[in-house]
Image (cartoon, rainbow, N blue to C red):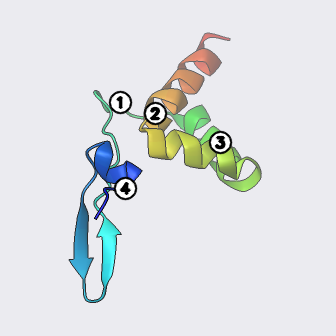
Amino acid sequence: MEKTIFEQMGGTYTQQGDYYLTNLVLPTEKEIRPIGVWGQRHLRYLKEYHRITYANLLTSGKLNSYLVDIDERSMRM
């Protein structure tokens, strides 16, 4: 049987009953820093009004650093 593109790129599956589920792992951020008030407000804004941007940042592992950056920019002003 020919491998799928996912398998050709090094992906693996786990069998759960009659189904094969992909073994996916979210990338981890290098450094977790605390998010301030403005970062938390921006997080709430992303969740409510920009769900796709929120999902993209979350799944790419860049959400925390993005929110910390927003918070630091707000503090400088």
For the point 53% across and 22% down, the residue is 69
| Residue type at the position of mark 3 | Thr
Residue 27 image-quadrant placement: top left
Residue highlighted by disc 4: 4
Point out which mark residue 33 bears: 1
For the point 22% across and 70% down, the residue is 14
Residue 24 image-quadrant placement: bottom left
Determine the CA span between mark 2 and mark 3.
11 Å
Residue highlighted by disc 2: 62
| Residue type at the position of mark 1 | Arg
In this rendering, position of residue 41 left or right of residue 59: right
Point out which mark residue 53 bears: 3
| Residue type at the position of mark 4 | Thr
The x, y position of residue 48, in whole percent, is 72, 55
| Residue type at the position of mark 2 | Lys
The x, y position of residue 18, in whole percent, is 30, 88
Q: Which element type, helix, strand or loop, lies under badge 3? A: helix
- Between discs 2 and 1, the one toward the N terminus: 1
